[in-house]
Amino acid sequence: MKLGFVGTGTISSAVIAGLAKSSLDIEEVIVSPRNAETAARLSEQHALVSVGKDNQDVVDRSQIVFLAVRPQIAEAVIRDIHFRSGQHVVSFIPVVSPETIAGWIGVPVKITQALPLPFVAHRLGATAFYPPEETISAIFSALGTAVAVTDRREYELLTTGSALMGTYFGILESAERWLTESGVPSLQAHAYLRQLFTGLAYATAVSPNAAFAELRSEFSTKGGLNEQIFRDFQGSGGTAALEGALAGALARVRGG
């Protein structure tokens, strides 16, 4: 396979790093030169990576093209490229619909939406993609777990769920700030919370069939502090605020 990446940000870099560690039969990975520093680094780190002259060169040399540009500049970037009829395009742009991208491309192409996360650099985590397609499934299976989604609405919901990463770290950030302002040294607070949440993530890994409500109960002593904090968090509108934020993000995903 010859794979091209238009956009060389965090996600493209993670996918390329994961592919380089896989056993997939990849002849070449061509990256766009827009972010010259990142493109040069990827080329230096991975023998299969070369830097295209421009976005058009990337597309011309690739069988499958991965679009990984920011939504704000996506239209300008995509309209400026000439794609081949029937070419396979994989969009990493979550808030722009395939129909919109197809309109910008202007020739018949096969479009897949995919949602790789930074963990694919280590061939971990799950990547949702829609619609199901054998080659794309093989690529993302090599990067962890490939989740082929047959329903567009389900894909949009999973896309929304993936946007919780910042909130996850925001909770850690808030807890660390509270601990340090209350008197715990910053390094100690950071190390403690990091290990605490690593352990909680491990608990989900070793109990894959356990409901989150079940795990919450298991890790909350009746009448204890864990139960109290979640009750107060919920009572203060925390869970309602989270659900409202998810609904707002879903509206944005569907509005693309």
Image (tube, rainbow, N blue to C red):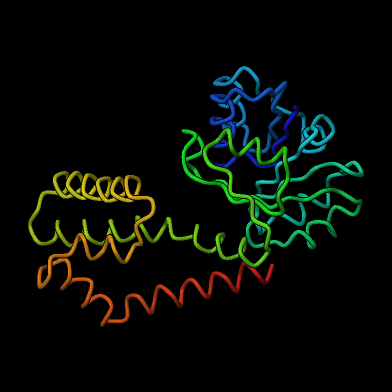
Going 77% across and 29% down the picture, which residue do you hit? 53
- Is 119 situated left or right of 217 in this image? right
Nearest to the observer: residue 215 or residue 184 = 215
Image spot of residue 199 (x, y percent)? 24, 46
Going 35% across and 75% down the picture, which residue do you hit? 239
Q: Is 151 located above or below residue 63 in the figure?
A: below
Q: Is 242 located above or below residue 20 in the figure?
A: below
- Is 1 situated left or right of 173 in this image? right
Q: Is 135 located above or below residue 164 in the figure?
A: above
Residue 74, quarter of the rendered image: bottom right
Going 78% across and 50% down the picture, which residue do you hit? 111
Going 17% across and 70% down the picture, which residue do you hit? 227
Nearest to the observer: residue 36 or residue 105 = 105
Residue 22, quarter of the rendered image: top right
Residue 54, quarter of the rendered image: top right
Image spot of residue 99 (x, y percent)? 80, 62
**Image quarter in which the N terminus is found:** top right
- Number of callouts: 0
Image spot of residue 147 (x, y percent)? 59, 49
Image spot of residue 248 (x, y percent)? 53, 75
Q: Residue lying furthest top in this view?
A: 47
**Image quarter in which the C terminus is found:** bottom right
